[in-house]
Image (spheres, rainbow, N blue to C red):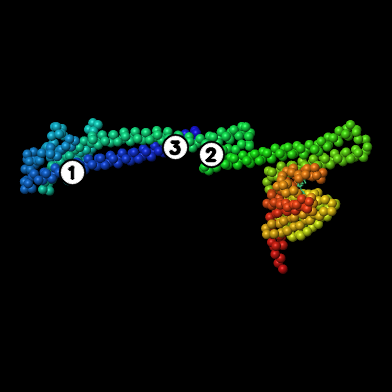
Amino acid sequence: MSIRLRLTLWYTSLLGITLVLSSLLMFFTVRYSLHNEVDRNIESRARQIQHSFQEVFSARLDPEIMMSQTKILAPPLETFSGPDLYIQILTLDGQIRDTSANLGGRHLPISNKALERARQGRTTWNTWQNGAAQLRVYTTPLSLGGVIVANLQVGEYLGEVDHILRKLSTILALVVAGALVLAAGMGSFLAQRAIAPVDQVTQAALHITRAEDLHRRLAVPGPADELGRLVAAINEMLDRLEMVFRSQQRFVADVSHELRTPLTAIQGNLDLLRIGAIDNPEDRHAALAALESEVARLSRMVNDLLFLARSDTATKTSHQPVELDTLLLDVFRQAQILGEDVSLSLGHEDQALAMGNPDRLRQVLLNLVDNALKYTPKGGQVTLSLFRDKGWSRVVIEDTGIGIPAEAIPHLFERFYRVDKGRSRLRGGSGLGLAIAKEIAEAHGGRIEVESEEGKGSRFTLWLPAIETQAAAAPSEY
Ligand code: ADP
């Protein structure tokens, strides 16, 4: 069932229920007040009759005589009756003494219960069904000088009231039905208008998907209402999808490109070896060494790629407290072997603890130090320092190397990004080192910052959330 149909149905049924309930309330209120008016009219007529009886008869007359003379002395009932109003006088035991002429020989019905109640001085209301019409009858004792001498009955046909009520119910039914038809029509139209932009958005989104045109965006309809926000959210999602898609494309292209170069070199050397073009044992040795180094580079790159692929989906590995000062010293010792022509030194060193995986943190530091050594020419200086500030530990790796151009800094941590491809490859770089370092730093809740000036040097800072050092956490007891 479409939203449009559901909205229309809901709207129409709610309106229908409200209209039917209010119509019923109105109908029964009108019916009650009309019936009430008839009863008041009958009552007042009965009071008038009672009153004129008392005037006609002298209180001095004996009630027995009065009764026997009723016919003669009673006021003419015609003065009180009306076209729909009938009057009848009965003896105490129910014998008809007099009727208004409009009864034409017929008489008003009387129940034994009403007679009984009248004898006790109480009045009774009865409604009799006479064919299609209803007859409302009021029975009341007629008393003279404090003695009940007869029963008076006043009856009125409810024909006029019934007629009004029938008319009212027809009008109400027509109004309710008309309003429902109108509401269904209007509701459907309004729902259609409200839903139409959703259809447009659906069509546009489908178009983008089918045409694989991630570049297109949905037009934002009108004001920033729910729909506007939905479209904005879809557009944002498309931005992100496009970005991921493009970077994926770039990544695949980069990987293929990166793999092709060593593979071409390997293929070339293999060809030369196969056709026996290299007789000289020294050249053969050199070719094999080149083969070995390219294979080593390939396997390093595949390992790096695997690491990055895993860390994309990896859940946090188990973390433990790591003494950063000890770790930095380790890295320093290890790097001393690498930096042959560059002077490597330790600068400021605080004590600092961080939660993390020591192997991964060592990998970050080694990547950064390795870069510093690689991109610092002979005679340069690389300094490693460790600072502990409020809540953070900072490992700073500073070099006096070739530096990085300002426009390259925002891309530095992208996979396969190299400032100068030729030079970097010569130094054995694949452009994955900093991407890996960034990934690890972020997995530890930290980040890496770069400051650099071309020709002067670079400073890489690894920020890690600090935890209390053991010495500070557990104060000495002495
Ligand atoms: P690579 O494996 O090529 O070194 P990285 O991701 O480690 O890849 O570094 C990306 C690029 O950043 C490098 O190609 C290099 O041009 C530049 N770079 C990184 N560290 C330094 C540095 N300390 N000095 C100058 N350039 C650097």
Q: In the image, residue 248 lies at what x, y percent?
A: 69, 39
> Of residues 317 and 264, which is closer to you in this image?
264
Q: In the image, residue 328 lies at what x, y percent?
A: 77, 55
> Of residues 281 and 237, which is closer to you in this image?
237
Identify the residue position indicated by label 1 in the image: 44
Question: What amino acid is labelled 2 in the image?
Answer: Pro
Q: In the figure, 53 relative to 103: above or below?
A: below
Q: In the image, residue 5 lies at what x, y percent?
A: 47, 34
Question: What amino acid is labelled 1 in the image?
Answer: Ser
Of tags 1 and 3, the one toward the viewer is 3
Identify the residue position indicated by label 2 in the image: 221
Mark 1 secondary-structure assignment: helix
Question: What amino acid is labelled 3 in the image?
Answer: Trp
Q: In the image, residue 118 lies at what x, y percent?
A: 17, 43
Q: What residue sits 53% from the left and 34% below the top?
A: 199
Left or right, residue 388 beside residue 273: left
Q: Cα distance, mark 1 to mark 3?
A: 51 Å
Q: Cα distance, mark 2 to mark 1?
A: 71 Å
